[in-house]
Image (cartoon, rainbow, N blue to C red):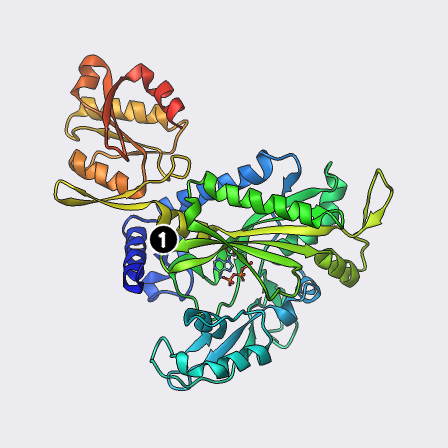
Amino acid sequence: MTKKEANNSMDKIVSLCKRRGFVFPSSEIYDGFTAVYDFGPYGVELANNIKKEWWKAMTQLRDDVVGLDSAIFMSPKIWKASGHVKGFSDPLTECRKCHSRLRLDTMLEEVGVFADEKMSEEEINNIFNENKDKIKCPNCGASDFTPAKQFNLLVQSNLGNFTGDWSKEPTYLRGETCQGIYVNFKNVLDSSRVKIPFGVAQIGKAFRNEITARQFIFRTREFEQMEMQYFIKPGDDAQYYEEWRQARWSFYLSLGIKETNLKWHKHENLVFYAKEAYDIEYNFPFGFKELEGVHARGDYDLSVHSQASGQDLNYLDPVSNQKFIPHVIETSAGVGRTFLAVLTEFYREEELDGDLRIVLALPPKLAPIKIAVFPLLKNKPELVAKAREIFNQLKLDYRCEFDDNGNIGKRYRRQDEIGTPFCLTIDFDTLEKDEVTVRERDGMQQVKIKVEEIKNYFQTKF
Ligand code: ATP
């Protein structure tokens, strides 16, 4: 795909998101708020369905992973101990002409020069100097930049600070959800029946002061993570790392994502906590980019928290009586990035009777609305009443939508764009012969079924 085509397809997705209520720019009536987005009526359903699938795969379908929902605010001591206060940063440079602040590693990568946010200031500035002529400011085109400095991404708040004195130690909004898991390791161990190896899964908001936030919901300053930390015996790292890499790859296939749109990326420069790190990348309209990280973190996290808190976070093996600090395999995915990957994967444009038909060919389990129910005509009370009756039954089991507005063709098109797999129309045959018409999104076939068969029919479809 050329850059122009990529922009084009990204624009189409962004436009669909706004037009149909999937994603809105934050604070839009106040000119927006950079790098923050809101999920609209259909967006929240899709995001919830993604989270539901992840939660099911990670907890319900396994007997070795339990859930957790830790608070966003935590003791600032956690972020000091974890290394984030010191080392959670990206290289920032400033354009001397227009004063845009830019993230240097991604700018280098965009012109084909290998760079990584984990490089030291000196390392990345050396590469920068060697390639200065290749890099232009994306906002004004100038090629005059300040040397890069590591910029800390933690977002600070004044929670609990009633003096207004900002020199006091700040409270942070969590930069990743997994710290809440590490600091609850002992609580989970002591209160549930888990034994090593076991995992703790959590979905929640994280916040990062991202320097350049472009590409829609791919990189935002407030986002949601789906993270799982798997605690293992030291020495078992390679086995479980491989198992989790496969499990996470299969998860995306289970969402209907084509394997050719996924790729592994191995990190050569490791972030301060990691022993081994691979990303699963997805083929977004702007190229293959990180969707999820799978990291072997060794004993780093529990060791630093054990030292800094003075609490013994050793695990006592009930069989061997051995004591050890468990090692951790982490899987860390973003809800927003999975959402964007799903939209990219299932967005289709087709020609239909000289018109453009836009379809979100979502798998039924991800579709925001499962069944749309239409009375053929709005001004026939008998049809509307019957349609309401059927809708009221179906809504007990499925997320449904009732729509009596406009002609049927237009109603179908609207549901196609939001990815509704089935539309059910109540017409005069319903009143006379107890039959409804079910129209299927992808092939647009229509079948007549008896009212009493509706329940069974959808049970086989979902
Ligand atoms: P990147 O290199 O793209 O900045 P990262 O390596 O810093 O990402 P991790 O810290 O490994 O990301 O976070 C795990 C996951 O959380 C990522 O794979 C991504 O899906 C999601 N994520 C991280 N940062 C953001 C962000 N700013 N906006 C949206 N999702 C994010």
* Front residue of this view, candidates 189 and 129: 129
Which residue is found at the position 47% from the left and 44% from the top? 252
Which residue is found at the position 28% from the left and 34% from the top? 441
Amino acid type, residue under disc 1 in the picture: Val
From the viewer's perspective, tell me whether residue 289 is left or right of residue 73.
Answer: left
Asked whether the viewer can see residue 157, the reply is: yes
* Front residue of this view, candidates 312 and 199: 199
Residue 125 in the image: above or below residue 424: below
Which percent across, then down, holds residue 239? 68, 45
* Front residue of this view, candidates 214 and 221: 214
Looking at the image, which residue sits at the far right? 321
Q: Quadrant of residue 430?
A: top left
Which residue is found at the position 76% from the left and 58% from the top? 303
* Front residue of this view, candidates 454 and 95: 95
Q: Quadrant of residue 393?
A: top left
Residue 40 in the image: above or below residue 457: below
Q: Which quarter of the rendering shows the N terminus?
A: bottom left
Looking at the image, which residue sits at the far top? 433
Q: Which residue is mark 1?
A: 23
Residue 430 in the image: above or below residue 94: above
Report the number of numbered marks: 1
Q: Is mark 1 within 8 Å of ligand 1?
A: no
From the viewer's perspective, tell me whether residue 77 is left or right of residue 361.
Answer: right
Q: Which quarter of the rendering shows the C terminus?
A: top left
Which percent across, then down, holds residue 111? 41, 72
Q: Residues within 10 Å of mark 1 (few under 14, many from 20)?
A: many
Which percent across, then down, holds residue 406? 16, 38
Element at label 1: strand
Which percent across, then down, holds residue 334? 50, 53
